[in-house]
Image (cartoon, grey):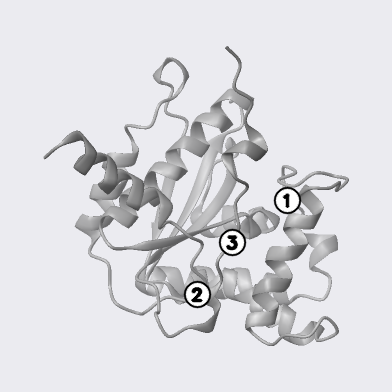
Amino acid sequence: MSNAGEAAIVDRAITTRRSVRAFLDTPVPRETVEDILAVASRAPSGTNTQPWKVYVLSGDAKARFCADVLAAYDDPERDAKYREEYPYYPREWVDPYLARRRKVGWDLYSLLEIRREDKVRMHEQHARNFRFFDAPVGLIFTIDRIMEQGSWLDYGMFLQSIMVAARARGLDTCPQAAFTQFHAIIKQHLRLTEEEMVVCGMSLGYADPEATANLLTTEREPVSGFVRFLS
């Protein structure tokens, strides 16, 4: 295969990656998941520290896990009981980041015909995170607390590699920071050690082509908007 052909395959895997929010119940073989994770393990990490640890959930194990986290999410006192262990988002929002965040949120709700004042449907839609959007496979990622910021950068490359390797196999994903609020529930359910911190979750499976939520297409800045060429 030519270099151009190889580049086209890689480019397609990257550019067709999207956050899918509705999956078919089609099973994903364990061997496929193992293959994806083996490919992703080639992601770079400083001095080859490989700071990632992965919990793969499916079947009854996933159902029990989701039931526990959903119960915590539906608890009226959840914000007092459950706190994320690290700030994923900025403490204070400014533009252009605030505008981008608002746009993707309201674009999704508009597709789903959820009005701004409809807090019940918003709650229900967000709750789908904790069912892994009905994907057959759910992934939970943890990192050792001793690791510093550089290892979190390495972790991002590992997560991206999983998503690209999944696309190369016709699968879709949704990386999910929503799980971080419920570290205490996840720790108990997965029997995490005291040293482990939840980084995020991820849904893995085949996108439901009929689902309205999957019509969402997010925008990207052109290269000219975020790059300066110096020579």
Residue at image point 69% right, 81% down: 110
Left or right of 111 in this view: 7: left
Left or right of 39 in this view: 201: right
Label 1, label 2: how many angstroms apart (C-alpha)?
27 Å
Disc 2 marks which residue?
214
Q: Residues within 10 Å of mark 3 (few under 14, many from 20)?
A: few
For residue 55, above or below residue 225: below
Q: Residue furthest left?
A: 1
9 vs 62, nearest the viewer = 9
The kind of residue tagged 3 is Thr
137 vs 206, nearest the viewer = 206
Label 3, label 2: how many angstroms apart (C-alpha)?
11 Å
Q: Which mark is residue 110?
A: none
**Residue 115 image offset from top left, x and y in percent:** 78, 85
Q: Which mark is residue 84?
A: 1
For residue 223, above or below residue 137: above
For residue 79, above or below residue 135: above
The kind of residue tagged 1 is Glu
Residue at image point 38% right, 47% down: 162
